[in-house]
Amino acid sequence: MTRLARFAVALLTSASLATPALAIAPDSTDAKAIMQAVEDRPTGDKSKGRLVMTIIDKSGRKRQRVVGSRAMDFAEGRRQIMVFESPADVKGTGLLSIDYDDGDKDDDQWLYLPSLHKSTRISSGDKSGSFMGTDLSYADMTANDPDHWTYTLLEQSATVDGEECWLIEAVPATEKAKSETGYLKTHVWVSKKKLMPLQLKAWVIAGRKIKLIKFDDIKQVDGIWVAHKIMARTVRGKTPESTTVLEFSDLSFGNADVGDDLFTQRQLEKGL
């Protein structure tokens, strides 16, 4: 994220093959070193993008939403703002996330609801809750600190769609990580070639549910690997409860108009 953040919605930070930071031996068995490398991989700064979000309930009914996103690094971590563009009933709704590299520091998140005409800070106790009725939580919007998790290599050579991966189990090592994410544990399939997750399985404590994430249509933008399609599904037992499909477009990095002034509560309430 482990939290899903950099694995899912904040995937605008996926990794480039050309950078030395990705140089970790494919036969490595050090699970924490692998996950630390995933977190430390170079990211596309000053990013812009748009995503179409399709939410499917257990009866098969679909709701579709369009969201604009901006993200950039800063000295202590990463900032991201997401604003709903359509349909009309959610237009203007937005989420501002200030994601700190220091896992001991609480990430800051604010949700803006146009009907209330103000932004509300998301408390730590609410971060495991669903974001706007999707299969993603508020905690999924922020990255994880490897020091707050215990990692175990389950398989040194697992395969996802023909691509060789490490299969790693992550268990919260602190009460903070457990309460904020709401996860008992996660399994992550990390591509040895791209050093990014290809799929993820999370055991949700509340309701004894399973969350499944699959990353597809992975291609490079400005030399950076990005999953352009993500499917997140929540199941209880063998029954799917809901599915969220994210499809990304108009992705770009190094945008001069993405600056500090975008990542404020005032801008969140104003929109992109």
Image: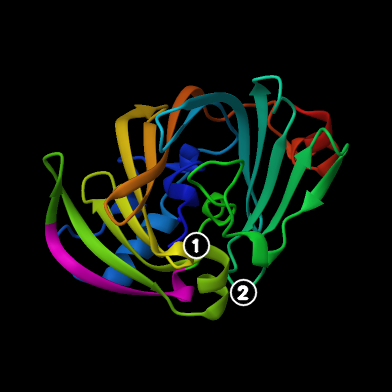
> Residue furthest toward the bottom?
174
Q: Residue at x 80, y 50 (%)?
A: 120
Identify the secondary structure beneath mark 1: loop
User: x%, y% of residue 6?
Assistant: 47, 49
User: x%, y% of residue 84?
Assistant: 66, 28
The answer to whether residue 183 shows anywhere in this view is yes
Please indicate whether residue 108 sits to the left or right of residue 238 in the image: right
Image quarter (top left, top right, bottom left or bottom right) of the C terminus: top right
Distance from Cα at disc 1 to Cα at disc 2: 11 Å
* Residue 124 circle label: none
Identify the secondary structure beneath mark 2: loop
Please indicate whether residue 233 sits to the left or right of residue 77 in the image: left
Task: Name which quarter of the figure residue 158 lies in.
Answer: bottom left
Whether pointer 1 and pointer 2 mark residues with C-beta atoms closer than 8 Å, the reply is no
User: x%, y% of residue 244?
Assistant: 44, 36
SS majority, magenta: strand
* Residue 144 circle label: 1
Which residue bears the numbered disc 2?
Answer: 104
Bounds of the magenta segment:
146-157
Amino acid type, residue under disc 1 in the picture: Asn
Closer to the camera in the image, 64 or 14: 64
- Reply yes or no: does residue 63 show up in magenta: no
Amino acid type, residue under disc 2 in the picture: Asp
